[in-house]
Amino acid sequence: MNRRGWGRVVVAASVLALVSLAANVTTLSQLEGRADTVLAGRLTVSQLVNAGTIWAGLAVVSGWLVRRPAPAVAAGVVALLTACVVHYGVGMAIGMFDLNVWTANVHWLLAAMVVGGPLGLVGAIARRWDRWGVAARLVVPVGAVLEPFVVGRFTTPAILPWPNRVADIISGLALLTAGVAGCFRVLAADGRRQAIPHGRATAEP
């Protein structure tokens, strides 16, 4: 058992859960429209740390950390469930949520169990240096490129307050930029590897 890898999985999941929770803290001045600049910044951070790509990336990284395919499947599920439980559990403890948060968000817990395994497996495959490995390493960057368009970050209705519109555009551009950069990095690394004779068959140390 890769105890160090599993420890990092739990830490990564907990950190994402707490940062996501903190990004959702709203002050009275924000609600009353007296701190729109702060609101725009908070919404931007919230949309980034709560992006589907980021949470999917958590499962992929978790699979990478534990290395082997079977544990990687479990790690993807454990990471997403841990993040959800920490997020809602701490939120309840500090009074942000009530008991209804579990039933209201049961779909996210179910989603974690359904998609966590395949995403964790992607992380394990990403350690390979063959075409499957390249494809696996492109999953998260490609997701970052597509997500802003799928969720409509660049087509926010003009009727919404300006902090929402600004947050949508900035978070969308951040995901798009990171995704494009990630794709180029993966493909460039693969190109360099192919230029070296007798390249390794796996990325594992």
Image (spheres, rainbow, N blue to C red):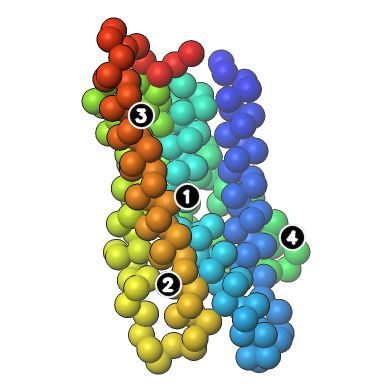
Q: Are dots 3 and 1 in contact, CB under 8 Å?
A: no
- Give the foreground label among 4 and 3: 3
**Residue at 30 percent of width and 65 percent of height:** 149
Q: Distance between the residues labelled 3 and 1?
A: 24 Å
The residue pinned by badge 1 equals 55
Q: How far apart are marks 2 and 4 (CA)?
A: 33 Å
Q: What element carries label 3?
A: helix
Between 202 and 98, the one lying in front of the other is 202
Q: How far apart are marks 4 and 3 (CA)?
A: 45 Å
**Label 3 amino acid?**
Ala
The residue pinned by badge 2 equals 169
**Label 2 amino acid?**
Ile
Between 79 and 33, the one lying in front of the other is 33
**Label 2 CA crowd tier, 10 Å (few <14, some 14–19, many 20+):** some
Between 192 and 151, the one lying in front of the other is 192
The residue pinned by badge 3 equals 189
Q: Is mark 4 on a helix, strand or loop?
A: helix
The residue pinned by badge 4 equals 93
**Residue at 49 percent of width and 86 percent of height:** 162
Q: Is residue 136 shown to the viewer in this render?
A: no
In the image, taking residue 89 as reference, residue 124 lies left or right, namely left
- Give the foreground label among 2 and 4: 2
**Label 4 CA crowd tier, 10 Å (few <14, some 14–19, many 20+):** few
Across and down, in percent, residue 190 comes to: 31, 27
- Give the foreground label among 1 and 2: 2
Quarter of the image for residue 27 reads bottom right
Q: Distance between the residues labelled 3 and 2?
A: 30 Å
Across and down, in percent, residue 21 comes to: 63, 61
